[in-house]
Image (cartoon, rainbow, N blue to C red):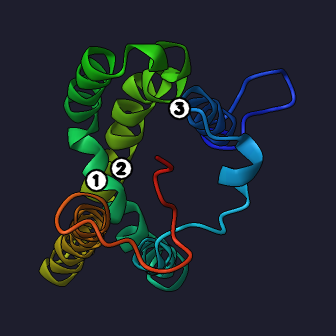
């Protein structure tokens, strides 16, 4: 429901993300087409899907504990987006919704992990799942920085800022 929405007119994160893309001047079709995704971003997404698809439920849930820190980071991002890109204000619904969703998701995850990681081995696997998710997020940030900031070399076929 967080990402897909529901039949009762509640928009999900995907629709709100496309609204943000449109606020930047991109078409929703271009973004939804996924043709310009950085290869390393596609790889990072697939790696996260592999965590939740192939590991035990306890580890899959534990990997989402990055949400524990999301509310503060999202608030900071929104402040900076409003400061530097005021025309995006109408497209920030994705982040506004995450201000409530992220703490709810984190509360569920921490409760689930607390109730189900009984042995030292399970606790170590929970920690490793969270580390793996953090590694994925760092790798994604690194490639975005490399492609669009320094040295600013997006690979062939990846999104390019049109001058």
Q: Mark 2–mark 3 contact, CB under 8 Å?
A: no
Q: Residue furthest front?
A: 163
Q: Which residue is mark 1?
A: 65
Q: Picture coordinates of residue 153 (x, y %)?
A: 31, 72
Q: In the rendered structure, which disc, 1 or 3, sits on the residue that comes first in sequence?
A: 3
Binning the other alpha carbons within 10 Å of mark 1 as few (below 14), some (14 to 19) or many (20 upward) gives many
Q: CA distance from mark 2 to mark 1?
A: 6 Å
**Residue at the (44%, 83%) spot, across then down:** 55
**Residue 79, position as x, y percentages in the image:** 25, 18
Q: What mark, if any, has residue 153 been given in the picture?
A: none
Residue 32, above or below 159: above
The residue where tag 3 is placed is 24
Residue drawn at x 51%, y 78% is 46
82 or 137, nearer to the observer: 82
Answer with the quarter of the image where residue 10 lies: top right
Task: Check if mark 2's residue and mark 1's residue have beta carbons within 8 Å.
Answer: yes
113 versus 52 height, above or below: above
| The label number, if any, that marks residue 109 in the structure image | 2
Q: CA distance from mark 2 to mark 3?
A: 33 Å
């Amino acid at each position: 429901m967080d990402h897909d929405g529901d039949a009762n007119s509640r928009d999900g994160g995907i629709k709100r993300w496309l609204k943000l893309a449109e606020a930047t001047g991109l078409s929703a079709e271009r973004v939804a087409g996924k043709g310009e995704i950085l290869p390393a971003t596609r790889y990072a997404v697939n790696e996260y899907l592999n965590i939740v698809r192939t590991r035990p439920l306890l580890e899959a849930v534990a990997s989402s504990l990055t949400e524990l820190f999301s509310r503060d980071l999202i608030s900071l991002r929104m402040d900076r987006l409003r400061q530097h890109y005021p025309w995006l204000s109408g497209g920030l619904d994705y982040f506004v919704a995450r201000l409530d969703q992220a703490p709810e998701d984190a509360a569920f995850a921490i409760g689930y992990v607390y109730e189900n990681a009984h042995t030292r081995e399970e606790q170590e696997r929970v920690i490793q799942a969270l580390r793996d998710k953090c590694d994925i997020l760092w790798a994604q940030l690194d490639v975005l920085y490399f492609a669009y900031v320094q040295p600013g070399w997006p690979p062939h076929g990846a999104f390019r800022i049109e001058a």
